[in-house]
Image (spheres, rainbow, N blue to C red):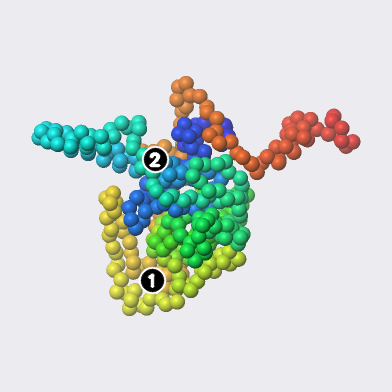
Amino acid sequence: MGKSSKDKRDAYYRLAKEQNWRARSAFKLIQLDEQFDLFSFQEPHKCTRVVDLCAAPGSWSQVLSRVLIKGESFGRRAWMEKMQRLVDEVKLAEKMERNEDAELSEEMSKINLDEEKPTLQPRPNVKIVAIDLQPMAPLEGIIQLQADITHPSTVGRMLSALNPEKSEADYDLVDLVISDGAPDVTGLHDLDIHIQSQLLYSALTLAIRVLRPGGKFVAKIFRGKDVDLIYAQLKLLFRRVHIAKPRSSRASSIEAFVVCEDYTPIEGWTPDLGRPVDVPRPATTMTEEEIEALPEQTRTVREDGTVELTFPRREARKLHKDNRWIAPFLACGDLDAYDADATYKLPEGHVSLDPVQPPTAPPYKEAIEKRRTEGGMYGKTKNREGTPS
């Protein structure tokens, strides 16, 4: 996180340092959780075992540590807990008006009305593994592996880290796999999209090896030509696939996040990092009569009141015809939240803070050292004899 003028006016860049996040990308995961409840407390979707791929510098792992291990709440979840405390306060006041003094003191002790210090809810038996090719500064409760997610040996190391005292037959699977990885972009969009898709397939291959049935997978994706083919392949493995754009992700960027829910393994198929694109179609396909029997439209009301529309017949016909499928697109985050593309006027008396965690091994370090030894970009130059002029 540098200190350019644009960065200083980027609200999420400033908020990340003020709220002690390692990078502004932490807000992306928080906003995705607001929309899809990735860190659910409820069975059967309870989240306690997570793998974070391409984790450096560690902002997503930091969110996992603070939410799952420490029990903190952020975004919509924190707001809902605050509303629940207010409801509890009103109910308690009504009891006091009815002179129901019994057990009131015990109930009052359970209600935390202090907004600055909400009750922490740490979860038991949490296991989080973070994997990246680059080194990463330590985080509380996070098991770190410096490994290449495109190399086959990483699968065994990841399984051993998740289950250090168990045999391969008794391995416990994970509830959630996330990946915020992206290549160093070249500016050639077709090439960048291709490399990103291969990175996504590698992350998916590792995820399938450790993800439990019904688990979730979240990964960064670059939207471009023929990206619907990737959506169709993901739809073969997950019952629900959405494309999400968090409010903290710049609209000018082609990045988005594919959120896959309810993992359904394909019987008799094991993914291979050597052929990550080889996702087979199911052995049996629906007939035209079975497709026609599906409802044209279904409505599902979520717990937060949001109405989700699905079109089972149209989706089945699309997959049956040409194996292409368009995933629903959702914008995540409160509409009142900061706009990632806007630059905001710095508040009066603003003091620029240092990064929470400076880069441990930045890829540009070698270039900086080389420039320094050669006299700098605009400094000394050398003549043909090699001596400074």
Return the x and y of residue 118 as percentages of the image width and height: 34, 35
The mark nearer the N terminus, 1 or 2, is: 2
Return the x and y of residue 306 as percentages of the image width and height: 29, 51
Q: Residue furthest front?
A: 165
Looking at the rendered structure, the kind of residue marked 1 is Arg
Q: Residue furthest left?
A: 98
Q: Quadrant of the C terminus?
A: top right
Q: Residue drawn at (58%, 50%), measured in percent from left and top?
A: 145
Task: Say which element carries label 2.
Answer: loop
Mark 2, residue position: 72
How many numbered callouts? 2
Q: Residue drawn at (41%, 63%), measured in percent from left and top?
A: 213
Separation of marks 1 and 2 at Cα, in angstroms: 44 Å
Looking at the rendered structure, the kind of residue marked 2 is Glu
- 30 vs 221, left or right, is left
Taking depth in this image into account, of 321 and 110 the one nearest to the observer is: 110
Label 2: how many Cα within 10 Å (few below 14, some 14–19, many 20+)? some
Return the x and y of residue 262 as percentages of the image width and height: 39, 61
